[in-house]
């Protein structure tokens, strides 16, 4: 057994709250055949652990973000969950105290789901409990069908439960889940439109399909079939329980995108996990509003005084962040105790190899954004990163990182290990601790 402590400048040490029990856990190589994750039917009381460590901060030389002066890194405590569920989890903390999340590609509570082809479906689950290691995960209803046509995939993205109403977004992918190009096999190399939200008034027991479609999406993009989008795969900013920390009562959405006439073109430039920019929109949540583009405002840059500009005209949208060929799937959580926004970005090019992820922080959602840590080859193929607000500690520095990993072992002869140990193709929850400048990790037997 070890106890984790942090040493601050000046010699002061602060003991972390959790004792980490060491288990005999090694980084595992996933089998070449992608086997769907198995189900968990009841409360799981699992405390698995490995040696805590600080993830190295290794940003590329062209990183446009200055290093944060208040958050300097991230510690993986070694404590993590051992749930056996499907993939693609984005928990939303509802007014009833539960978290509700989409999922797909795998098995949850004995029910299978996949999101490719004409029979594409997306799952919906409730996560009951306050301890990340003892959650009861149940399906609220059967996975819901929704056609991706004329695209080939329709996957979960932005999800919000607010005042008892669940708004569940999906996005399109193409041209196929496996595409050969110049001797390399890619996964879903084209990111498609956002066909809006399906809606539930009873916490996911019954659903009203989105009135929109891939051919008539919420946002007026792409200009041409298989062309680039800006508000791609949008995710709702996590403002805490029932959106309690929204600055203005609005729901904010962050999307990944690319522009026409890209100065640095590449194949699979804007895919399910790669992009060039991050974009931002907001709306007052409501059944009449969420699927009506006229109710939305879009971030359109800053004025001469540095004040953010919001426009009702989608054509005026501008990037919130721009790092060409280095962005991708994006989520944002508001850390209320720290009064900070935390953004997770994954650059997963070329879609089926090792992936890089990084965490940014900001005092305001419109920036400026600063680098906390650049995690090279996190996962080693980690994706869909987010910090569920329900699991943020009272001091705001201990969080749980939700993600999935290593869905494509063996593709293009790439072997993948799990790093950090305990990852899986499916729901992962790992406890982490944010470091302030000057803090280091001290372990004692």
Image (cartoon, rainbow, N blue to C red):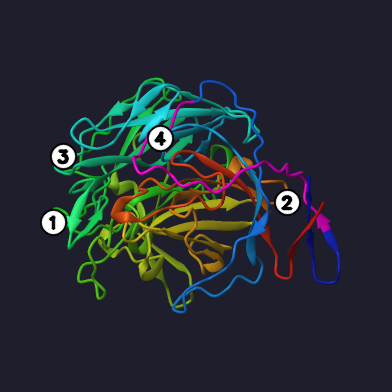
Which residue corresponds to mark 4?
A: 103
Look at 37% across and 58% down and name the residue there: 348
**Magenta stretch holds residue 35:** yes
Residue 67 vs residue 167, the one in the foreground = 67
Mark closer to the observer (3, 4) = 4
Q: Secondary structure at mark 1?
A: loop
Residue 251 vs residue 303, the one in the foreground = 251
Mark closer to the observer (4, 1) = 4
Numbered range of the magenta stretch: 14-39
Q: Secondary structure at mark 3?
A: loop
Residue 114, horizontal then vertical, whole percent: 30, 33
Q: Do labels 3 and 4 touch, CB within 8 Å? A: no
Q: Is residue 164 visible?
A: no
Between the residue at mark 4 and the residue at mark 2, the CA separation in whole angstroms equals 30 Å
* Lower sequence index among marks 3 and 2: 3
Which residue corresponds to mark 1?
A: 224
Q: Is residue 260 visible?
A: yes
Q: Secondary structure at mark 2?
A: loop
Magenta span: predominant SS is: loop
Between the residue at mark 3 and the residue at mark 4, the CA separation in whole angstroms equals 20 Å
In which image quadrant can residue 119 be found? top left
**Residue 23, placed above or below residue 397:** above
Between the residue at mark 3 and the residue at mark 2, the CA separation in whole angstroms equals 47 Å
Q: Which dot marks residue 100? A: none
Quadrant of image for the N terminus:
top right
Which residue corresponds to mark 3?
A: 149
Side of 416 where 132 appears, left or right: right
Which residue corresponds to mark 2?
A: 395
Residue 49, horizontal then vertical, whole percent: 66, 43
Residue 313, horizontal then vertical, whole percent: 28, 58
Look at 53% across and 70% down and name the residue there: 58
Between the residue at mark 3 and the residue at mark 1, the CA separation in whole angstroms equals 15 Å
């Amino acid at each position: 057994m070890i106890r984790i402590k942090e040493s601050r400048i000046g010699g002061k040490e602060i003991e972390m709250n959790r004792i980490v029990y060491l288990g005999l856990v090694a980084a595992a190589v996933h089998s070449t055949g992608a086997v769907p994750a198995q189900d968990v039917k009841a409360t799981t009381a699992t405390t698995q652990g490995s040696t805590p460590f600080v993830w190295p901060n290794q940003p590329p030389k062209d990183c446009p973000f200055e290093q944060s002066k208040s958050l300097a890194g991230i510690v993986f405590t070694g404590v993590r969950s051992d749930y056996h569920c499907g993939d693609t989890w984005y928990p939303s903390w509802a007014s009833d105290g539960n978290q509700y999340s989409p999922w797909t590609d795998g098995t949850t509570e004995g029910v299978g789901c996949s999101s490719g082809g004409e029979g594409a479906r997306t799952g919906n689950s409730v996560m009951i409990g306050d301890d990340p290691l003892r959650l009861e995960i149940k399906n609220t209803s059967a996975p819901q069908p929704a056609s991706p046509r004329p695209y080939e995939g329709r996957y979960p993205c932005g999800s919000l439960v607010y005042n008892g109403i669940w708004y569940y977004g999906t996005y399109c992918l193409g041209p196929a889940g496996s595409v050969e190009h110049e001797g390399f096999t890619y996964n879903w190399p084209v990111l498609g439109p956002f066909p809006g939200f399906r809606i539930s008034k009873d916490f996911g027991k019954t659903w009203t399909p989105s009135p929109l479609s891939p051919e008539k999406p919420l946002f007026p993009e792409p200009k041409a079939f298989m062309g680039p989008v800006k508000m791609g795969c949008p995710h709702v900013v996590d403002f805490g329980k029932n959106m309690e920390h929204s600055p203005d009562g609005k729901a904010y959405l962050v999307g990944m995108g690319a522009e026409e006439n890209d100065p640095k073109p590449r194949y699979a430039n804007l895919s399910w996990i790669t992009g060039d920019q991050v974009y931002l929109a907001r709306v007052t949540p409501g059944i009449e509003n969420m699927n009506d583009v006229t109710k939305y405002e879009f971030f359109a840059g800053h004025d001469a005084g540095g004040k953010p500009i919001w426009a009702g005209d989608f054509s005026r949208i501008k990037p919130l962040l721009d790092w060409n060929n280095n962005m991708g799937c994006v989520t944002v959580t508001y850390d209320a105790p720290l009064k900070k926004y935390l953004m997770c970005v994954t650059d997963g090019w070329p879609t089926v190899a090792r992936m890089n992820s990084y965490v940014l922080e900001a005092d305001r959602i419109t920036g400026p954004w600063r680098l906390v840590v650049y995690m090279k080859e996190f996962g080693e193929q980690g994706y869909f990163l987010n910090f569920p607000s329900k699991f943020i500690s009272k001091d705001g520095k201990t969080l749980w990182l939700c993600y999935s990993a290593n869905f494509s072992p063996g593709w293009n002869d790439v072997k993948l290990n799990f790093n950090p140990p305990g990852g899986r193709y499916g729901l992962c929850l790992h406890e982490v601790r944010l470091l302030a400048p000057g803090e280091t990790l001290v372990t004692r037997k």
